[in-house]
Amino acid sequence: MTQTETSEELFSLPASFGQKRMWLLEQAGSGTALYTMRAALRLRGPLDPAALERALTEVVARHEVLRSVLRLDGNDIAQVVRAPGPVSLPVVEVPGGPEAAVALAAELSREPFDLAAGPLLRCTLLRLAEDDHVLLALVHHSVCDGMSLGVLLRELTALYEPCLHGAAHQLEELPLQYADYAVWLREQVASGALEEQLAYWGERLAGVRELRLPADLPRPAVRAWSAVSAPVKVAAPVVRQLRLTAPGGGVTAPMVALAAYAVVLSRWSGQEDLVVGLPVAGRPEVDLEPLVGFFVNTLPIRVDLSGDPSFGELLAQVRDRCVEAYSRADVPFELMVERAHPDRRAGRLPLAQTLLNVQQSVPLGLAPITGVTLEPVELPDTALQFDAVADLVEQGDAVTGHVSLSADLFAAETAALVARSLSAVLRAASAAPGTPLSALPCPVADARPAAGGAQAPQETYEEPLRELPAGGGKPQTPGEHLLVALWREVLELAEVGVHDEFYALGGNSMRAVRIVTAAREQGLELPLDRMLGQHTIREVIAHTEAAAAAAGHRTTAAPAAA
């Protein structure tokens, strides 16, 4: 999709917490398409591409966030909203049928977005035949989430016929825009209204360690971020029986899935204390439901599997922790990370290295188009930013979906073993909920020599936790002198040593960006991915100089006053 090159910029506001995280992740892994949301809709019947293009233009005009870009503005990230303008819908001929369309969709999905230049929405109409098309929508995650894709498709189909016939549409005016939500949430945080929730997350996540799954392959220096997947299918009677297992009731299918997933992860990794990220809609008010935007939040659910409890006992714990988390879901994940102070490593997501997404199967609610059959097209995963993700759908207690693992670390056979393990744990626990977790079948653990308490090979992790030298340490090189001065300024400290760890001194992601930006202005290029992980001044400068030497040039920086 392209918009007019001369789109006027209407206004600029601070980005939401989620948008800041997306911006940081993009800077740390630029050139990838990890954070592209995708949806495809097959339209069979007589279709007017020009009318569909006009409908798309109208959708983008309705939602300011779809004509926004993200830019670094001083020490903060801003969302810049552009004026409405024509939106083009390219039509591409695709011989070869639906399979060829899915393959082309995967290829188009790999093209990254430029967050500063935009646009952050690209739509293409793939023509399979004269009366057979696939509409592909690609949207950057910073302006969209899963519910937003449904909003986009519903409005697009609702606007098509009015645009075809030149009639007025019946869609209600939006009560809010995404920028209004972002401002409201910032005000909530600034006022202290979320302090009790923040305190809960800080206490619940204190001392959490990262999940270390025994990888099949050494962790590469440069990751391709591709995925290997395997299907999961669990019958409704199994889930229904388990929902009745936990004392006190109140267990949902997602809680059952989370308990089983935690068992598999624990048995596979040998860790009894782990965190699983649980996405939630993040739309606490009804006025937010018709909006496009990045609302989804991640709740890091910490699960304790020590003492070899029964599955029923574990399920009761998972239920209680989920209920606690749901009542404190207003806190953006980014602030949970800051409050928890977890271990940080370059190239690794903090707090949660795995995700469980359980959605209910609900109709999309597409508006009918006369003479045209509408059918969603499933697009297989092509990129994965987590080590492991279980993506499941709940339909009348039955659970189906797939498990995806990072292809940089795991073979396809391991993904199949994890999927089998999830199903096996659920079936066995359903038959005998009092069975200790260690006695439940878990093929991925049985097939892995690292299971049963052993840790993953150390070489599969980029940065082993290290003991820092005692004392701060004096700067010795121009680069170290410069960073000492910048750390003092940004962290507002009187003394900083080259062995002091950035986040232990009160650093956070945005402060890391400020240091990278200020250092760049003085001729020192710092790697943002390294700055977003745990680091000291000496470690960052050593890494930067080694990378510069490998590239055939030297890093220079004028000495700064100590």
Image (tube, rainbow, N blue to C red):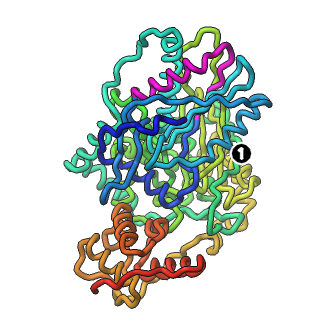
Residue 356 higher or lower than 10, as above or below: below
Where the N terminus falls, by quadrant?
top right
Residue occupying the far left of the picture:
191
Looking at the picture, tell me which residue is in the foreground, 177 or 2: 2
Residue occupying the far front of the picture:
6
For residue 313, say whether it is visible: no
The amino acid sitting under disc 1 is Ala
Residue 70 higher or lower than 38, as above or below: below
Looking at the picture, tell me which residue is in the foreground, 428 or 521: 521
Residue 503 higher or lower than 367, as above or below: below
Q: Position of residue 397 (x, y in %)?
A: 59, 30
For residue 378, say whether it is visible: yes
Q: Position of residue 478 (x, y in %)?
A: 39, 86
Q: Is residue 43 magenta?
A: yes
Image-quadrant location for residue 295: top left
The residue located at (22%, 80%) in the rendering is 494
Looking at the picture, tell me which residue is in the foreground, 224 or 166: 166
Tell me the residue that label 1 is attached to: 230
Q: Is residue 391 magenta?
A: no
Question: Which residues are the magenta region?
Answer: 39-62
Q: Position of residue 518 (x, y in %)?
A: 34, 69
The residue located at (59%, 26%) in the rendering is 396
Where the C terminus falls, by quadrant?
bottom left
Image-quadrant location for residue 455: bottom right
Q: Position of residue 161 (x, y in %)?
A: 52, 12
Residue 215 left/right relative to 171:
right
Image-quadrant location for residue 83: top left
Residue 464 higher or lower than 247, as above or below: below
